[in-house]
Each structure stands twice: as structure tokens, then as C-alpha cells.
Amino acid sequence: MSLRGAQRARFWLAWVLAFSVVLAGCSSAATAPSGAQGSAGSQNGAQGEVLIGVMGPLTGDSAEYGKIWRRGFDLALEEINAAGGVQGRPLNYVFEDTQSDPKQSPAVAQKFVNDPRVVAVIGDFSSPASMAASPIFQRAGLVQLGITNSHPDFTKTGDFIWSNSTSQTDEAPFLARLAVEQLGRKRLAVLHQNTDWGKTTADLFVEQARALGAEVVLQEAYLLTEKDFRPVLTKARDAQPDALVLISYYNDGALIAQQIPAVGLDVTVLAASSVYSPQFLNLGGAAVEGVYTVSRFHPADPRPEAQQFVERFRERYGTDPDTFAAGAYDGMKILAAVLNRVGVDRKALRDGLEQAEHLETILQGATAFGEDRRLRNPRFVPLVVRGGAFAIWNP
């Protein structure tokens, strides 16, 4: 090789080595834990952090839910780690953004399965995104705890799939009773997301409403990508309902509410609990005033444990917690309590969840998991948007 050729070879070798270092640094940053307690760094040994994987929306249309989750997680971690962590080790989490998209969640699930530091996973936010990942967790023997997954089939994938969220088999009938029995509405138009969760929730609502003597004059699905709801709202208007029921999230629910006056539809509006978010109020403005919904939690809950949680949350964030914050807080607390009892092991955690009794939660008080791997004794409270805020509705 000539001198010039040798110099060229050394140059390219140095360039490749430098680029490899950059790539290695980028890869490390992408997998670093993003929880309240900092990065796991090199603490991967027996005395390092106990790591929970979280998959959910940090960007996209559902990003507000992820933001609220993190507040609940971080508050729980402060208390858990101040009390000694998990068997003397700090508890932390790494949050991977899926935009709550069923097309993205399986890849994130496989990433968590392959990471030996991850002892359990929380998420995803939507039931479709969560259920797309569940078979991966079940095959690998890694607990998936759904904190917002109300689809009745979510926990049916297998014995590693758990939830501290109520099922729509409980919530949708409660919403129907609110509409028919408490508000006295007998002609109902139902609009729902064109997803498995949306259709299942709508069907459960309609079944209960009809059993109570109501007539469902319209049941119509819409795409999550829709922005102009005037055509379907015109169909609802022409069906002459006395109530419009939205099986929606905060963003699409607020957009529908804003477009209701444009078609001359003047009815009572009810919505699934998924609209219980500050963003529903921010996006909907005056259009969501008077909308009814249901929740498992409200900051006016008088129970001592609920009020202590509300006070800590207000002190930390300067705002009130909602159901999603409380569910995230409860989920992290449940995992920590069971891991403290059984040890930091994936299979032991699954067995511990099955055997656990008297789990202390904000949403349901002292409870335990039932045979369906959901918490027993779900409770709901009716809410109404009044004065630009969610208030407990007392008939």
C-alpha cells in the first residue's frame, strides 16, 4: 500500500470509530429511565434501581393523559423511596412514548421484555394499544398493569395481565343509569369512536339503556381522525333525541361539543369518563358547560386518604388531581407494595398480585384483585361541568 493509501485508510478508520462512539451514546440516551428519581445509569446490579416500564402517550392527541400519569407516578415515587423504596432499593420508571397507538405499542413491549431491569410494565393508555401488546407480555411472563384499560377483554389474555381500572361492564351501565334514571332522558343518540373500545363501550351502554326503557334513536361510529362532525351531528339532530351520549376522549369529545350548536341540536350531553381531563375544559370552553360524565374519583371526595392525596398533589403541582392521576399513583403504589412483600422478580410479582389482600388505594380504598384480575368493588361518582370545572352532581 502506498503512503497516501495508508493515510487514507487511517483517516477512514478513525472516522468510523468516532461515529460508533456517537451512536453508542445516542442508544444509551434513548433507553435511560425518565422517572422522577433520575437515570438508572450503571446501577444494573442487585443493589441498583428497581425499574418499572411505562408505555403511553407523551406526544400526539392523547399526550395530556401521559402528562397527568407522570404526575401521579412521580408523587408516588417520592413517597415510596422516602419510605425505603422496594426492599431497600430505589424504585424508578422509564416512560416510552407510543402515542397510544396499537401499531407502536408491540415494539415497545418487546423492548421492555428484553430489558432484564424491567420487573413490570404499566400501560398503555388506550385499551386497543394495550391489548396489542398484551400477548407479548403474557408469553414473556412480564406483568402488564393497565391503569386506564376499561375494555372488558383486556385482562383475558392471560394471568400476567392485570388492571386497577374498572371495566366498561361496570362503567357503561352506570352512565346509562345516570342518563335514563337520574336525568330522565328516554331518547338517546350515541356517538362513539370507531375502535374496539368505542364499539364495546357503546354496546354495553345501549344494552343497559334499553333495559331501563330508553329508546336508542341513533348509534353511530366516527373515526379518530375526523375533525368535522357536523354530518353525524345532523343525523343525530334529525333523530330527535333528548340526550347525546359521547363515547370519546377529551380531544374528540370537546370538538364534537363545540360543533353541536352549528347543527341546531339542543340536548343534554353525557360522555364517557375518558373526557374527565383539564384538556376537555380547555379545548371545549363554554361548549362543554353542562356536560355530564362519571368518574371513579373527584378531589372533593371526603375520605381521609383521598384528601391527603389531594393536598399533596396540590402542593406539588398547584392543581387538583383527577382520576388518571389517582390511577397512576395507585398503580405505582400497588406494584411497590407487592414487590416489597415478594421480592424483585417477575414471576413472584405475578403470584404476589394474586395473593395480595388489603391493598390501599385512592380510587377504591382497601381492596384486592378478583378472579378477573381487576380490583374488586368499583365505585363511581356522577360529575357535571359547571362554571368551567368538573363538579360532583347531586340529584
Image (spheres, rainbow, N blue to C red):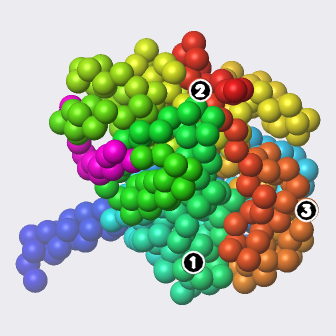
Q: Residues within 10 Å of mark 3 (few under 14, many from 20)?
A: few
In screen coordinates, is 107 left or right of 290? left
In screen coordinates, is 202 left or right of 87? left
Q: Please say if 183 is above or below 191.
A: above
219 in the magenta segment? yes
3 and 2 marks in contact (CB < 8 Å)? no
- In the rendered structure, find residue 156 and report the number of the disc placed on it: 1
Q: Where residue 212 sits: x, y (%)? A: 56, 50
Magenta residues (range): 216-230
Q: Please say if 355 is above or below 329.
A: below
Q: Residues within 10 Å of mark 2 (few under 14, many from 20)?
A: many
Going by the numbered disc 2, the residue's amino acid type is Val
Q: Please say if 286 is above or below 112.
A: above
Residue visible at 53% across and 71% down?
A: 153
| Mark whose residue sits in front, 1 or 2 | 2
Q: CA distance from mark 1 to mark 2?
A: 33 Å
Q: CA distance from mark 3 to mark 1?
A: 23 Å
In screen coordinates, is 96 left or right of 232? right
Going by the numbered disc 1, the residue's amino acid type is Lys
Quadrant of the rendered image containing residue 251: top left
User: Where is mark 2, residue-wise?
Assistant: 384
Please state, as top left, top right, bottom left or bottom right, where the N terminus lies in the image.
bottom left
Q: Please say if 174 is above or below 268.
A: below
Q: Nearer the viewer, residue 149 or 49?
A: 149
Q: CA distance from mark 3 to mark 2?
A: 32 Å
User: Where is mark 3, residue-wise?
Assistant: 358
Q: Where residue 13 sits: x, y (%)? A: 25, 71
79 in the magenta segment? no
Going by the numbered disc 3, the residue's amino acid type is His
